[in-house]
């Protein structure tokens, strides 16, 4: 099972913490979403997509990757971090994956330090997140995915 984990983690590197932990534990290749958009991904069986959340969806370049660059027929999974989880943040990317005949294996999300807009004035929200427990949760999530 050849896997690549593609990420966009521009706000505080919160999502990258999940990505690095999963990649280290399982020896998975990683790429930024910009790098991945220029790569031939056909040899990968499984594609992980990891992003922070902005305005209720994955970041813009990641949403665009899902529209334009995700190869058809792959197994995909999602990781994200967000200031305040709605439980719906992966809905858009999941629908885009299915539209490209990909199988969604699962979604893991947790909170991540957020200083966007007005939250900056109060020193941010979700300080200290992702916690080590939440990072370990991402590693467990990956380990639990069906082959
Ligand atoms: C422009 C912007 C918009 C955001 N919108 C949301 C949002 O709609 N919902 C939410 O829960 N968090 C939102 N956040 C918080 C980020 O998703 C959160 O801090 C995340 O952990 C950042 O991940 P990163 O450090 O990997 O980029 C927003 C952050 C930014 C910068």
Image (tube, grey):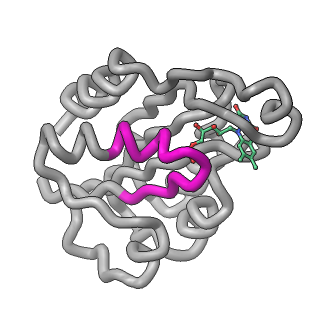
Residue 38: x percent and y percent?
41, 84
Residue 76: x percent and y percent?
37, 50
Nearer to me, 99 or 132? 132
In this rendering, is residue 33 above or below 94? below
Residue 94: x percent and y percent?
55, 46
Nearer to me, 41 or 133? 133
Q: Quadrant of residue 46?
A: bottom left
Residue displayed at 45% across by 48% down: 50
Nearer to me, 50 or 91? 50
Q: Is residue 98 left or right of residue 6?
A: right
Residues shaded magenta: 6-19
In this rendering, is residue 12 above or below 39? above
Nearer to me, 50 or 115? 115
Residue displayed at 37% across by 40% down: 17
Q: Is residue 113 left or right of residue 18?
A: right
Q: Is residue 59 left or right of residue 140?
A: right
């Amino acid at each position: 099972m050849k896997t690549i984990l593609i990420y966009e983690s521009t706000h505080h590197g919160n999502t990258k913490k999940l990505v690095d932990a999963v990649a280290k534990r399982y020896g998975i290749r990683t790429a930024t979403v910009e790098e991945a958009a220029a790569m031939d991904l056909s040899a990968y069986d499984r594609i992980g997509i990891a992003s922070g959340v902005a305005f209720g969806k994955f970041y813009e370049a990641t949403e665009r990757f899902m529209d334009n660059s995700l190869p058809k027929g792959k197994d995909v999974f999602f990781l994200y971090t967000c200031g305040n989880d709605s439980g719906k943040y992966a809905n858009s990317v999941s629908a885009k994956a299915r539209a490209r005949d990909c199988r969604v294996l699962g979604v893991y999300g947790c909170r991540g330090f957020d200083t966007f807009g007005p939250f900056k004035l109060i020193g941010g929200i979700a300080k200290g997140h992702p916690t080590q427990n939440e990072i370990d949760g991402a590693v467990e999530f990956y380990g639990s995915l069906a082959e």
